[in-house]
Amino acid sequence: MIRTVLARLYWAFSRWTLSTTPAPTRPTILIGAPHTSNWDFVLMLAIAWRLGIPVRWLGKDSLFRGWRGPLMRGLGGIPVDRKNPYGVVKDVVARIRAGEVFGLVVTPEGTRGSGTYWKSGFYRIARETGMPVTLGYVDRTTMTTGLGLTLELTGDVASDMDRVRAFYADKSGMRPELRTEPRLREESRGGSTAPLS
């Protein structure tokens, strides 16, 4: 398959090292973090193609306008309307319930700039579908990238996110100054993410 060949060539000549646990064996949500550069997208595709993981990914709807639309969709993209973020969660849940099987790549920081919170869409999708969450990473300090732990979320947001934070504690991203600490707004409220209706 051409994607596999391209991925092998990429990793053969890349300055980055692919360091990963075995690829997930069932549908999962693949977290891409820290998300601090456009190059994260290239690394994500290279990881997925090398490991043979069929992926879909969420991207801002402006990426799908004009001639880029068919290309982005061909690469697995699902456009996100930032004015209606809950709509994309419902859309993805509907795809999964309809029998579509894929690894869903999500960058919960939502932007390449530093912020206060991660977006909770990945958590909502995981809880609604029963999908586990696989922690993908980029670490410039070691020049490594890949997939790490796969977690089953419990619904205890603070406890689940403590495990996520522990994993990413030593992962810098490509531009460490833009990294956002893994934390959901729901943690500060002492609640859990609301189920989808």
Image (tube, rainbow, N blue to C red):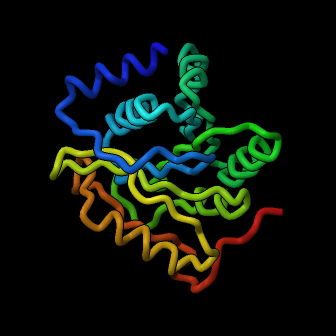
Classify residue 50 as left or right of residue 132.
left
Question: Which picture quadrant has residue 4?
Answer: top left
Residue at 27% x, 28% y is 11
Residue at image position (69%, 51%) is 89
Between residue 168 and residue 186, name the one nearer to us: 168
Closest to the observer: 101 or 105?
A: 101
The quarter of the picture where the C terminus appears is bottom right
Please determine whether, in this image, residue 75 is positioned above or below residue 17.
above
Is residue 48 shown above or below 148?
above
Quarter of the image for residue 40 reads: top left
Q: Looking at the picture, does residue 171 appear above or below residue 140?
A: below
Report the front residue among 25 and 123: 25
In percent of width and height, residue 177 lies at: 22, 56
Q: Residue at x 55, y 31 (%)?
A: 62
> Residue 174 at what x, y percent from top left?
24, 46
Q: Residue 107: give x, y in percent of width and height.
A: 47, 49
Which residue corresponds to the image point at 49% horizontal and 31% vertical from the top-left?
A: 52
What is the x, y in percent for residue 104? 58, 44
Query: How many marks do you count on the picture?
Result: 0
